[in-house]
Amino acid sequence: MVMTSHQDLMNTDSKTGLWIGEFADPYYEFIDQGYEIVLASPLGGKPPIDPLSKLTENITASNRRFTEDEVAKKALSETRLLEEVEASEFDAVFFPGGHGPLFDLANSDICGQLILDFYKQKKPIAAVCHGPAALIKAVELEPAILKGKRVTGFSDAEEKLVFRENNIPFTVENRLVWLGGDYHNAVIPFSSHVEQDGLLITGQNPLSAVPAAKTLIELLEARTDS
């Protein structure tokens, strides 16, 4: 699981970072199915957490489980440097959201090369909410990663509803379309929505984190069975 190290927004003193539910929800889906998880980020160590994701209305059961899980908390506080991660070590990669990825993962050559390596090794790539921004540098290296693929991510409508459109460099929906993705989203904002196109799995928003993780698990299990 690759997370952002970025916390500053544009034109505001408000902070962003990792949306904690989009980490915790998939994390426990993977752990409960027996998968070993390695956490990484551009700067290593503990990623910044979006303060809004800690508000009561955004807390999930996995959030509460995480607060009592010393092993998971230690893992999150000691993420590996992204530059030390090799695709050959892993079966799949998962990118949680929060607005942070729009600033660092989207511009990271290291992240782009890592995704390209997963792509070349025919391994699943999954991302949720603003996590698909991590694809940008990889698509510059290999447009086929996204060109014509059914994808989703945090929608322009949702961005307007959270009042962040003037605090970010671009919107996920707009950039995915501009890069050649076949973008789709739920009719009702903040409803769960997941797209799978081959080995590429994307989720639209926080409510899509668990379904995206389950889709990835199903894909991995199917590959193991075959």
Image (cartoon, helix red, strand yellow):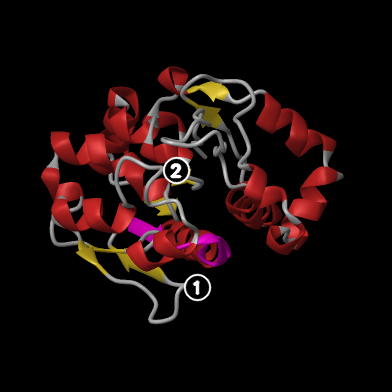
- In the image, is residue 125 above or below residue 70? below
Kindly report the distance in space between the C-alpha atoms of the residues bearing marks 1 and 2. Answer: 25 Å
- In the image, is residue 166 above or below residue 184? above
Residue 222 visible in the snapshot:
no
- Between 119 and 132, which is closer to the camera in this rendering? 132
- Disc 1 element: loop
Where, quadrant-wise, is the C terminus in this rendering? bottom left
Q: Which residues are magenta?
A: 200-210
Check disc 1 and report the residue beneath it.
192
- Disc 2 element: loop
Residue 81, numbered circle: none
Neighbour class for label 2 at 10 Å: few (<14), some, many (≥20)? some
Residue 129 in picture, x, y percent from top left: 45, 55
Q: Is residue 20 left or right of residue 126?
A: right
Residue 29 in picture, x, y percent from top left: 64, 57
At 56% from the left and 41% from the top, the residue drawn is 18
Check disc 2 and report the residue beneath it.
91
At 67% from the left and 32% from the top, the residue drawn is 76
Residue 145 visible in the snapshot:
yes
How many labels, in total? 2
Q: Earlier in the sequence, mark 1 or mark 2?
A: 2
Residue 207 shown in magenta: yes
Residue 29 shown in magenta: no
- In the image, is residue 32 above or below residue 157? above
The three-letter amino acid code for the residue at tag 2 is: Asp
Nearer to us: label 1 or label 2: 1
Rendering quarter of residue 201: bottom left
Neighbour class for label 1 at 10 Å: few (<14), some, many (≥20)? some
Residue 118 in picture, x, y percent from top left: 32, 39
Q: Is residue 3 left or right of residue 122?
A: right
The three-letter amino acid code for the residue at tag 1 is: Ser
